[in-house]
Image (spheres, grey):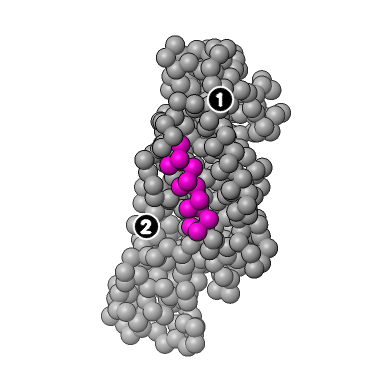
């Protein structure tokens, strides 16, 4: 049994794919986090209450579980308090996942109800959409002649990414390193004043060429960092510099719209916030493409809305895209041996099970408002075959 708690501020969306094969019982605890100053973010009286509720549900649903195993699952939950005490932030919710092989605690930005679910699967559906959105990456390149910055961003966080060693952060540094010899062709580097400003008419005439060559160096460094990634890159800078960089750029996923204005006076969080406004459409593109596919193949055997058929197909690894109503919830029993739903047995939320199985086999799950789900059903699915 895993005894070490993995406490992280977030859970990578990709990690959800690993949770479908976890052996039950699986305990999922969610509780709101507090945002007031001078207090722990988690109400640990609630956590103790959740542990008691999990004990009750284990006794009811898993009566044959050895007492030592049940005790190991429950007592370890008390470790969560000390691990996350130092977390700061505003609002959001704590999620704890516990099974014999998994012990995770992480934060989601949405407000979740206080719940304890014990079953064959982790109950990921209530916070699935929050993880999807928060884990969609994009990059921001702050273009400045004094300090070029590359930020790696999700919807709720950003961090600066280091470029290759030796990459100049500003134009003046680049002019003084000697790496611009091909640009100057043996000429003395032009005189610059404070903050890299050009001080003669001749130097000003050369400015665009120097900036372009400097941006060639930056583009090479950025492309090396982002090579092979599918994530958007948003440029932030004055219009002239963004135009020059765009003409040089070789990264294939440069976002069409940029952030206007110099980033020099902006903190990383401010730069992230402005870029987030630009990439809002990025968060809806995957579901839009899947819905377009539904329009093309709707009415065929690969586009289905039958709930039992979708659940069965998800366990058979046939679901490529699952569309689900945001508050979908259906209790039932699915016999994985017979590959069919049945009446008797330990009840599970089959919407949650279908979503988890779809993810485990590499499919996509799109949580939608009721009117957007094809067929206006709880679930709809596009099958691989």
- Is 275 in front, or is 307? 307
Is residue 250 among what the camera can see?
yes
Give the SS element for disc 2. Answer: helix
Q: Residue at x 44, y 45 (%)?
A: 103
Select label 2 or label 1 by which is in front: 1
Q: Quadrant of residue 28?
A: top right
Task: Spot the residue most to the front.
Answer: 67
Is residue 138 in the magenta section? no
* Majority SS type along the magenta span: helix
Identify the residue position indicated by label 2 in the image.
225
Q: Position of residue 227 (x, y in %)?
A: 36, 51
- Is 343 in front, or is 133? 343
Identify the residue position indicated by label 1 in the image.
348
Q: Residue at x 49, y 83 (%)?
A: 195
Q: Is residue 20 left or right of residue 240?
A: left
Q: Position of residue 385 (x, y in %)?
A: 45, 17
Q: Position of residue 61 (x, y in %)?
A: 53, 26
């Amino acid at each position: 049994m895993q005894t070490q708690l993995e406490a992280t501020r977030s859970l990578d969306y990709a990690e959800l794919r690993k949770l479908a094969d976890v052996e039950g019982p699986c305990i999922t605890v969610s509780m709101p986090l507090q945002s007031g100053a001078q207090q722990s973010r988690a109400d640990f009286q609630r956590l103790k209450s959740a542990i008691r509720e999990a004990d009750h549900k284990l006794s009811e649903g898993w009566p044959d579980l050895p007492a030592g195993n049940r005790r190991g699952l429950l007592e370890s939950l008390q470790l969560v308090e000390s691990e996350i005490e130092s977390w700061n932030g505003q609002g959001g919710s704590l999620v704890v996942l516990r099974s014999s092989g998994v012990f995770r605690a992480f934060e989601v930005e949405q407000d979740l109800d206080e719940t304890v679910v014990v079953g064959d699967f982790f109950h990921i559906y209530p916070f699935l959409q929050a993880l999807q959105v928060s884990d969609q990456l994009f990059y921001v390149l702050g273009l400045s002649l004094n300090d070029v910055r590359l930020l790696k961003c999700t919807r709720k966080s950003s961090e600066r990414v280091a470029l290759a060693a030796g990459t100049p952060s500003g134009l003046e540094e680049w002019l003084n390193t000697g790496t611009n010899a091909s640009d100057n062709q043996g000429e003395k580097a032009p005189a610059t004043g404070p903050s890299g400003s050009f001080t003669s008419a001749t130097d000003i005439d050369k400015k665009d060429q120097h900036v372009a060559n400097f941006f060639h160096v930056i583009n090479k460094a950025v492309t090396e960092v982002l090579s092979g990634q599918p994530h958007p890159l948003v440029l932030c800078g004055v219009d002239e510099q963004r135009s020059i960089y765009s003409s040089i750029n070789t990264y294939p996923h440069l976002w069409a719209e940029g952030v206007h204005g110099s980033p020099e006076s902006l903190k990383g969080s401010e730069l992230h916030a402005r870029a987030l406004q630009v990439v809002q459409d990025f968060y809806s593109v995957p579901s839009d493409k899947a819905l377009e596919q539904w329009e093309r193949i709707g009415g065929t055997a690969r586009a289905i809305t039958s709930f039992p058929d979708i659940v069965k197909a998800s366990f058979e690894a046939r679901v490529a895209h699952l569309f689900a109503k945001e508050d979908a919830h259906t209790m039932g029993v699915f016999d994985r041996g017979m590959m069919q739903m049945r009446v008797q047995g330990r009840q599970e939320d089959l919407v949650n099970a279908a979503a988890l199985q779809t993810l485990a086999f590499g499919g996509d799950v799109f949580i939608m408002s009721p009117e957007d789900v094809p067929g206006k059903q709880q679930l709809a699915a596009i099958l691989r075959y």
